[in-house]
């Protein structure tokens, strides 16, 4: 049986990165964006949970902080699935019955 977590219990990867990685290193969004070679608005959207973590950005975090890009991408996938499950009742699809 799969463990079901309420979507609110899962943090967006950007929020987690901000509170657990970026802020403890004494960095702000502007400094991190400059270090990563991305725009400040892009970094701000990610850190505030308004933009998904891309594989490219996960690799930047891996290179800068040593945290696995694979782990970060799994966090994004888990977050996305939890958000979708929160409204799965609105997704109407009939089961396919395949002939054997």
Image (spheres, rainbow, N blue to C red):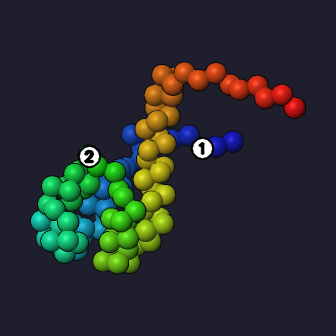
Residue at 47% across / 64% down in the picture?
71
Give above or below for 88 relative to 47: above
Give above or below for 94 relative to 51: above
Identify the image quadrant of the N terminus. Answer: top right
Residue 78, image x and y in percent? 48, 49
Element marked by disc 2: loop
Identify the image quadrant of the C terminus. Answer: top right
Can residue 27 be spotted in the picture? no
Residue at 47% across / 41% down in the picture?
82
Q: Mark 1 or 2 closer to N-term?
A: 1
Distance between the Cα atoms at labels 1 and 2?
Answer: 26 Å
- Give the number of the disc on residue 3: 1
- Give the number of the disc on residue 50: 2
Q: Residues within 10 Å of mark 2 (few under 14, many from 20)?
A: some
Query: Residue 75 appears in which quarter of the rendering?
Result: bottom left
Q: Residues within 10 Å of mark 1 (few under 14, many from 20)?
A: few
Residue 74, image x and y in percent? 49, 58
Element marked by disc 1: loop
Residue 62, image x and y in percent? 37, 74
Residue at 84% across / 28% down in the picture?
99
Query: Residue 28 appears in which quarter of the rendering?
Result: bottom left
Give above or below for 6 relative to 29: above
Q: Is residue 4 left or right of 9 when viewed as pictured?
A: right
Foreground of the two, 10 or 54? 54
């Amino acid at each position: 049986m799969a463990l079901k977590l309420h979507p609110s219990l899962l943090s967006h990867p950007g929020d987690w990165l901000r509170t657990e990685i970026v802020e403890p290193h004494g960095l702000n969004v502007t400094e991190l964006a400059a270090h990563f070679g991305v725009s400040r608005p892009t970094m701000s959207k990610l850190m505030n949970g308004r933009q998904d973590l891309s594989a490219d950005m996960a690799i930047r975090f891996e290179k800068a902080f040593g945290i696995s890009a694979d782990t970060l991408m799994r966090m994004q996938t888990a977050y996305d699935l939890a958000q979708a499950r929160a409204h799965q009742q609105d997704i109407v699809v009939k089961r396919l019955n395949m002939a054997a």
